[in-house]
Amino acid sequence: MRKYNINYFARTLPIFFLLNITCLPVKSSSALAAWSLNSNGVLELRTKKNSNLKAYYQKANQLYGDRFWVDFNGELLNPRIIKGNGPIKEIRLGKPVSGKTRLVIEFAPEKSINPYKLKLIGVDENKWKIKLTSFPLNSFKTMKEGNVLKTTVLSKKRKELKSLRDINLGNSDLPYIKRNKYSVVIDPGHGGPDSGAVGIDGLKETDVVLDVSKIVTKLLLEKGVNVKMTRNKDEDLDLSPRVALANKMKSDIFVSIHANASRGKKRYINGIETFYYSGWRGRLLAEKIQKEILKVSPGSPDRGVRRGRYFVIKKTNMPAVLAEIGFVTGRLDSRRLEKKIHRRRVAFAIAKGILEYFKRVG
Ligand SMILES: [Zn+2]
């Protein structure tokens, strides 16, 4: 058991407990995983490993009772207030500044705590304890969120993410096909004033899909596929010219790349889906692409391969699909889609799906 000393200051009492100096990136999720204020006055915390916490005490003033709070790295998603009981007025979970999480325990007006006895103890690499009060036992009911005792285990998702890092994204890792035989039209959805879906932190569908489309195009060109993009910059483009390009060129396939948004921008909705309009070839192409995108998007739900009546896949004369590579409004998907490395993985997946399709249909 390691103990950490407290630095005393006149009114506000900052307590710094540094397990090490690792700081999480500003945009990461909150380092606070669970907390419990037990009826014996002990506050228990479970955090991410190697978190850097700062704790403060402030004496009551006209507005507030005695307050004790802890700041964590990483952004809290849902600020909230939990009504207290007994000597605890309330517990607040807030976002004092972007990228931070704050847990505040405010005591009832007539109650006070002795800050000189506060001592936060690091129980292990992700668990913390501090005795806050010395009120009679069971003078209030335990308040908690989550399970403070849960040990951090490598979840299935994390394991999958780790395995993702081992996927090679090089051209030589893509299937071999005959050079100069196939032609493809890649259609990045939206563009110009039509930004498509706008998601968390202003993440725009049009930017995401353009970047992915460019990488798909590059990968396929390197494989000897004749590829045209319907747009290769942020420009306004109607649906008809997209279709016309493919029909005029008589490309073998047409692949439109989009990102999704849920109604009401629900953050818990994530997932991958690929649409085709008709024919077994369209369906096969959609299946190949869907399967590959899922491989690089662990944890993101498989919303399946489905028939869709979208203009660009309905009006094109060749097998055509529309891939939705994730939700810009979804917590999981958007965090990935904003990262270059993930966009590269998705592009690799789409290119691989296309090449697998060509290998199959010959
Ligand atoms: Zn779209």
Image (cartoon, rainbow, N blue to C red):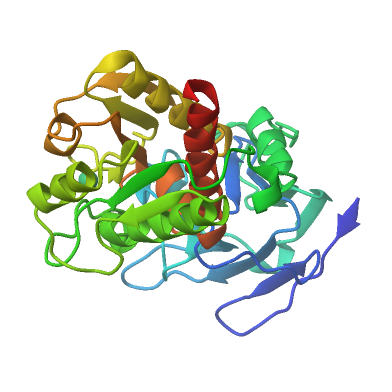
- Label count reads 0
Looking at the image, residue 76 sits to the left or right of residue 269; the answer is right
Looking at the image, residue 261 sits to the left or right of residue 211; the answer is left
In this view, 91 is above or below 271: below
Q: Residue at x 38, y 20 (%)?
A: 304
Between 210 and 203, the residue placed more toward the observer is 210
Which residue is the extreme one toward the bottom?
10
In percent of width and height, residue 263 lies at: 17, 37
Visible in this render: residue 205? yes
In percent of width and height, residue 9 lies at: 64, 83
Looking at the image, residue 94 sits to the left or right of residue 282; the answer is right
Which residue is the extreme one toward the front?
180
Between 142 and 251, the residue placed more toward the observer is 251
In this view, 331 is above or below 153: below
In percent of width and height, residue 303 lies at: 37, 23
Visible in this render: residue 144? no
Tell me where residue 278 sits by quadrant.
top left
Which residue is the extreme one toward the top?
280
Tell me where residue 54 sits by quadrant.
bottom right
In this view, 239 is above or below 148: below
Q: Residue at x 13, y 59 (%)?
A: 237
Looking at the image, residue 291 sits to the left or right of residue 96; the answer is right
Between 255 and 66, the residue placed more toward the observer is 255
